Structure formats: structure tokens, C-alpha cells
Amino acid sequence: MTFSTITYVVEAGIARLTLNRPERLNSFTEEMHAEIRLALAALDADRSVRALVLSGAGRGFCAGQDLNDRSVAIGDSPPDIGVTIENNYKPLVLRLQNLRVPTLCAVNGIAAGAGASLALACDIVIAARSASFLQAFSKIGLIPDTGGTWFLPQRVGMARALGLALLADKLPAEKAAAWGLIWDCVDDAELMPTVNRLAAQLAGAPTRALVRTREAMRAGITNSLETQLDLERDLMQELGHSHDYREGVTAFMTRRAPNFTGE
């Protein structure tokens, strides 16, 4: 597939989706949303893919919505931003959150607005030390979207989430890691080597078990303890019949490296 606003390649079981509008800090347009949907659909159909790396080209990760795009541009009448959310951002977040493989986000430079929330929709986020996160919505009279009002309070607590949203101050990557917003902050030169190493680790892991772990932890946010214990029972029952469980135990018992397939 040939794209104009993203790049998408698969190599050694790792799908790499790169936002590719560096001249606009990889800000979202209708076209970019459509191309991301196509790439993620291709990923879902490709059983060789075992992990996804999401990144941004150039000096930033993603500056959020491109306010010059026709879907949100100010004209003679107010744009219906709700339609843009419903058609683009909502399905994007849900697709990432329910992808059949683990997801890893590499944040270089600024991750602002929907760009920050896009990163948080991934399972593991690694940021360069020069990167920062910005909830800029209050500066233009809006609220955090793309799941921002859901991700932020869960990751950093209500006090910090409200501070970030209401004050619209930049959060440096190092502080974001210290607050638990992201997994890690590394030196700029180490960003992609670190991400590549972790992506290879995820791609060689028992993929189904990783995805079920994600599902169980998210369910635990609202489940009662008893309901969560029931869910753990059901998922363990499923995974106990998997190829990867048999392979993992056999490899452990025979003291060799496992060869997981994700099945």
C-alpha cells in the first residue's frame, strides 16, 4: 500500500506505523485518519504481525488535530467537531485499545492534544528526554479528547490530570515518566534502539497472553474483586489450552528458549 500521510512497513513480525507529515508536526487530517484505518486493518489481517510500533517522523510525534483541515476549520458556521470525534478519533482509540497485538509508542518531540492521547492509547510508551506532553485543549475552548479524560486521571490521578488539562502546561518526558504517565524516558539517541529492542521482545512473546493481560487489567478498573477473579479464571482456562502455554512450560522444563507463535 502507498500512503501520503503515514508510512507502514512490516519486518520480522513488527509492524511500524509512522505519522508522516513532519512539516505540520504530524498533525491529524481526514486523509491521515483514513490511511491509519487502512494500515491497522492490514495489520489485523496479517497473522505474521506480532507487535506494533507507532512513531512520528521529523522533530515531533504529533501536534494533534490540524486546525486547517476542512473537518474542523472555522467558516461561516461552526464545525461539528462531534462528527469528527465520532468518525475518526473514537474508532482510532478503540482500534488501538483492542488490537490483537501489543502496541508500543515512541514519542519524539511534542505530543500535543490528540497526539498525546494517541500515545497513551498504546500499551507501552517510551519518550525521548527532549519530548513533552501537552493538553492544549483549554487554549482553544475545548476539552481533552481521543480518550484524554479517561487516560489522564487513571495514569496520574485527578489532581494532576486536572492541572494538566486546565493549565495546558507542557509536561516534560522525564516528569511524565516519574508521574507514571508513560513507561520510560530515555536519552534522545537511545529512543529508537530502546523501542526496537522492546518491540522485538514483544514480537517474540506469547502474543495472546499479552493481549489478554491488557484486557484483564482494563476490566479490573471497574470490576468488583469477585467479577475480576471470575474473569481471571476464564482467561486462564482459555490460555491453558493455547500452544504458547504448552511451549512455555516445555521450554522451561527442558531448559531451552521458547518459540512462541501467538497461538
Image: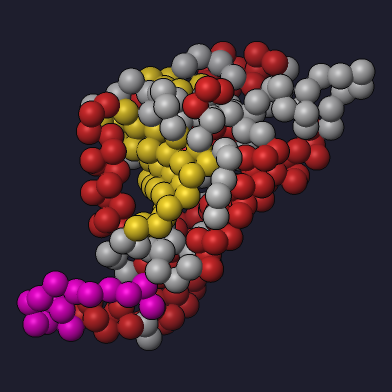
Q: Residue at x 32, y 69 (%)?
A: 206
Instruction: Please state the horizontal and vertical placement of residue 231, each as a whole percent of the image.
Output: 49, 71
Side of 256 relative to 194 (left or right): left
Magenta extent: 250-263
Q: Taking the image as drawn, is residue 209 in sight?
A: no
Q: Is residue 240 magenta?
A: no
Question: Considering only vertical position in the picture, is 38 above or below 135?
Answer: below
Instruction: Please state the horizontal and vertical placement of residue 60, each as a whole percent of the image.
Output: 44, 25
Instruction: Please state the horizontal and vertical placement of residue 250, each as a whole percent of the image.
Output: 18, 83
Question: Considering only vertical position in the picture, is 104 above or below 55?
Answer: below
Pick out the residue farthest to the front: 2
Instruction: Please state the horizontal and vertical placement of residue 245, each as a whole percent of the image.
Output: 29, 79
Name the image quarter holding the N terminus: bottom right
The foreground one among 92 and 224 is 92
Q: Residue at x 70, y 16 (%)?
A: 140
Q: Taking the image as drawn, is residue 131 in sight?
A: yes
Side of 184 relative to 36 (left or right): left
Q: How many marks?
A: 0
Q: Residue at x 67, y 40 (%)?
A: 31
The foreground one among 136 and 110 is 110
Please tell me whether the stretch drawn in magenta is mainly helix, strand or loop.
Answer: loop
Q: Is residue 261 magenta?
A: yes
The foreground one among 168 and 263 is 263
Q: Residue at x 40, y 69 (%)?
A: 48
Name the image quarter holding the C terminus: bottom left
User: In the figure, residue 252 lies in which quadrant?
Assistant: bottom left
Pick out the residue farthest to the right: 76
